[in-house]
Image (cartoon, rainbow, N blue to C red):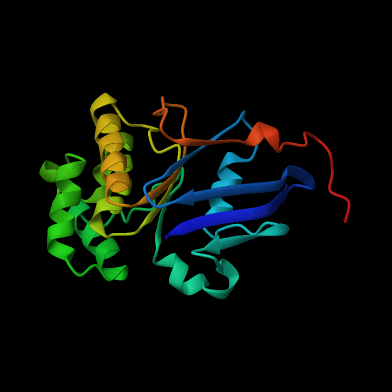
Amino acid sequence: MMSFTGTGLTCLRSDRVVFQNLNFSVAKNEALYVKGPNGSGKSSLLRIMAGLLCPINGELYWNGEKLSEIEDDFKGKLHYVGHQNPIKGALSVRENLKFWASIHGSERENNSVVSALETFKLEKFADLPARFLSAGQARRLNLARLNATPAPLWILDEPHNSLDEGASLALDENVARHLDKGGMVVISTHDSISKKVKVLDLSDFALGRSKLEL
């Protein structure tokens, strides 16, 4: 059964232990809600999960295999949406989606791009250069990557930022469909969360200003 787990994770930032000995697990059809106060390491943990930051201790596993041994394969299994919107301003909205679909090897590139445009109500902006998008529209384009190419694991860091009520609802519905289809989601958000999700509270692993002794 598809699974994503971490054991004994310790994160050090600016000579400060942000969290230590953290364990998590998320499986097919599951969502993991990462919560905690500012500075507790939510973004750092999600970046570790996405392979963008290395923990100083601990291991990550995909389907029981160490990520360090299957790193290239794992990159094709996830979508990471962080605080920045990595869109190409010179390309149109449609071209951005086609680019993302092509580099992930989507077998249904044209259909997936159409689906992505429809899901986040971007059809009327499809041929507009992305540099002309508002903050909310750029955020929707970034999130549309989720539909432009398939990936079983979505790691979403404050994905509702800059979204209006309609776009937030579209995102929530999109996440629900992904889970229903057997996907996995790890999410950090200030918005309301369904009671059906698993919760990982980083307050349980915070060490305040303590420093790691090696």
- Find residue 48 and report its horizontal and vertical position in percent: 58, 54
Question: x, y (%) of residue 200?
Answer: 57, 37
Q: Is residue 191 left or right of residue 46?
A: left
Q: In the image, is 124 to the left or to the right of 135? A: left
Q: Is residue 23 above or below residue 108?
A: above
How many marks do you count on the picture?
0
Location of the N terminus by quadrant is: bottom left
Name which residue lies at 75% across and 47% down.
14
Q: Is residue 196 above or below residue 108?
A: above
Q: Residue at x 16, y 66 (%)?
A: 108
Task: From the top left corner, tell me how far across and down residue 96 is, in percent.
Answer: 25, 57
User: In the rendered view, would you say 79 is above or below 161?
Assistant: below
Q: Position of residue 71 (x, y in %)?
A: 52, 71
**Is residue 183 or residue 169 the one in the foreground?**
183
Residue nearer the viewer, 137 or 10: 10
Q: Nearer the viewer, residue 189 or 130?
A: 189
Residue occupying the far right of the picture: 213
- The residue under the point 26% across, 30% down is 169
Which quarter shows the C terminus?
Answer: bottom right
Please, which residue is most extreme toward the front here?
1
Image position of 143 (left or right of 213)? left
Q: Name above or below for residue 35 compared with residue 128.
A: above
Q: Residue at x 30, y 35 (%)?
A: 172
State left or right for residue 101 relative to residue 4.
left
